[in-house]
Image (cartoon, rainbow, N blue to C red):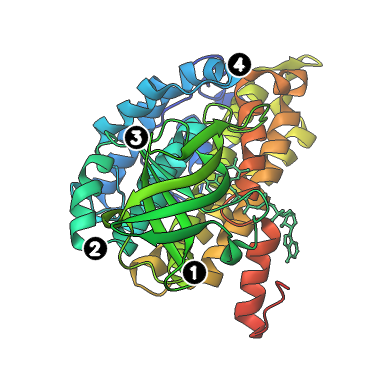
Amino acid sequence: MLKFKRPHTTMPMEAPSEAAPDASTLGAGVSPARVLEAAHDYFDLDGLLTPEERVLRHRVRTFVDAEIVPYIGAYWERDETPLHLFKKIASLEIGGGTIQGYGCPGLSPLIAGVLQYELTRGDGSMATLFGVTTGLAMQSIYQLGSEAQRQRWLPSMATLELIGSFGLTEPQIGSDAAHITTTARRDGDHYVLNGAKRWIGGATFADIIIVYAQDDQTGQIGAFVVEQGAPGFQATKIEHKLALRALPNADIVLKDCRVPLGNKLERCRSFKDVARVLATTRAGVAWSAIGHAQAAYEFALAYAKSRVQFGRPIAGFQLIQAKLVEMLSELEAMKLLAWRLSTLGAAGQMTDGQAALVKMFNASKARRVVALARETLGGNGILIDRHVARHFADMEAVYSYEGTHEINTLVVGREITGMQAFV
Ligand SMILES: Cc1cc2nc3c(=O)[nH]c(=O)nc-3n(C[C@H](O)[C@H](O)[C@H](O)COP(=O)(O)OP(=O)(O)OC[C@H]3O[C@@H](n4cnc5c(N)ncnc54)[C@H](O)[C@@H]3O)c2cc1C
């Protein structure tokens, strides 16, 4: 028998509050409390966590509901980044996720993923900035940097005092990331970077940007830590974006940008090293997709239970229940797949293909869930203050970043056939 034991928290703000169900409509043997719990964690994801991890999960969920959800819609609408809200995440002491030491919490891949889901359930822009700083940028330094480089940057990134950014994509090179054209030329005790980057999250205000470029000495891709304001570095916000609006993406121009030798990450020797970082963070994005879908589902469920048409709550109609159940079934499948990916990651057995498959699967299922949630709210589904529209729009970015659906499909295809179909 299923046990639903965790305390239930509801979404604040404009979301209709969820009253306990009317016992007279439930049928024999079903309690109102069980209905409420079943609606939110049907296969008891909490039960897969340790007691300490459960506490942490609920601390993050409570924080997000109180500190982010009530405020973020207005920033999203105005296309502004509430850095003060972002910095509050530091109080949760989760920066750096799975990294051991350097002021990081050394979480298991599972709880790190679940926390990424909880942050995204609040807001995708804040969660993406968290993922870029403490995932992509910190993992680049952790996996590719020397011990001295780790000591130099990781502790202040873990506390979000330093914000990091990750610059791989270029205007003319997106999916074909192994063939970036930005160059790094050795000149005395500096490297000189030339080229352009596009879509770089947070690069307009980040303190450090990990820029990937072709090293003229090795001909291979290297990673360079560029400090904000370095001469020759210019980041310009990409305007008119319709997803993740509370986090700017930048076009970067590097024109004879001088970077000290000590800022070249010492253990980045080829694109394979970059791919290792991306596989780690792809697992986090698979969890982010769940966060968007979970938020949209919770709002849709609460709305359906309170919105009355034809004299009764729309949740009582079979066609609405079919939508809610489809959302829930996709959600729970996504969670179980992400859970398995994380446990394989913890055992050091996760392959690039497995990470690609779960990112690809979860992003496409989440896209379906947010669309179903949006239509469940009818016209209100396109209003920002109802939240679902924000998650609906943000899922479009998740679908395309950290490897598009097609590229992740091809990574899996390569792993199961032994044949590369990219070109
Ligand atoms: C909101 C957002 C945030 C981002 N943040 C960052 C960041 O912080 N840092 C960073 O470096 N990058 C970032 N990116 C870039 C992101 O990783 C790229 O958008 C992504 O890799 C795809 O590249 P592209 O947009 O140039 O599309 P393209 O590579 O031009 O692809 C266009 C379409 O063609 C398809 N396609 C390409 N090649 C093939 C093929 N061989 N077979 C079949 N189909 C193919 C793609 O799947 C896609 O549908 C971000 C992107 C977005 C939208």
Image disc number at residue 385 = 4
- Dot 3 or dot 2: first in sequence order is 3
Q: Viewed as shown, does residue 310 lie left or right of 237?
A: right
Closest to the observer, 143 or 225: 225
Dot 3: element: helix
- Quarter holding the N terminus is bottom left
Classed neighbour count for the residue bearing mark 4: other residues with Cα under 10 Å, few (<14), some (14–19), many (≥20): some
Return the residue at label 1.
271
- Dot 4 or dot 1: first in sequence order is 1
Return the residue at label 3.
60
Image disc number at residue 361 = none
Q: Viewed as shown, does residue 216 lie left or right of 372?
A: left
Q: Residue at x 33, y 58 (%)?
A: 264
Labels 3 & 4 near each other (Cβ < 8 A): no
Residue 263, image x, y percentages: 30, 53
- Dot 3 or dot 4: first in sequence order is 3
Residue 150, image x, y percentages: 23, 55
Q: Viewed as shown, does residue 241 lie left or right of 46?
A: right
| Amino acid type, residue under disc 3 in the picture | Val
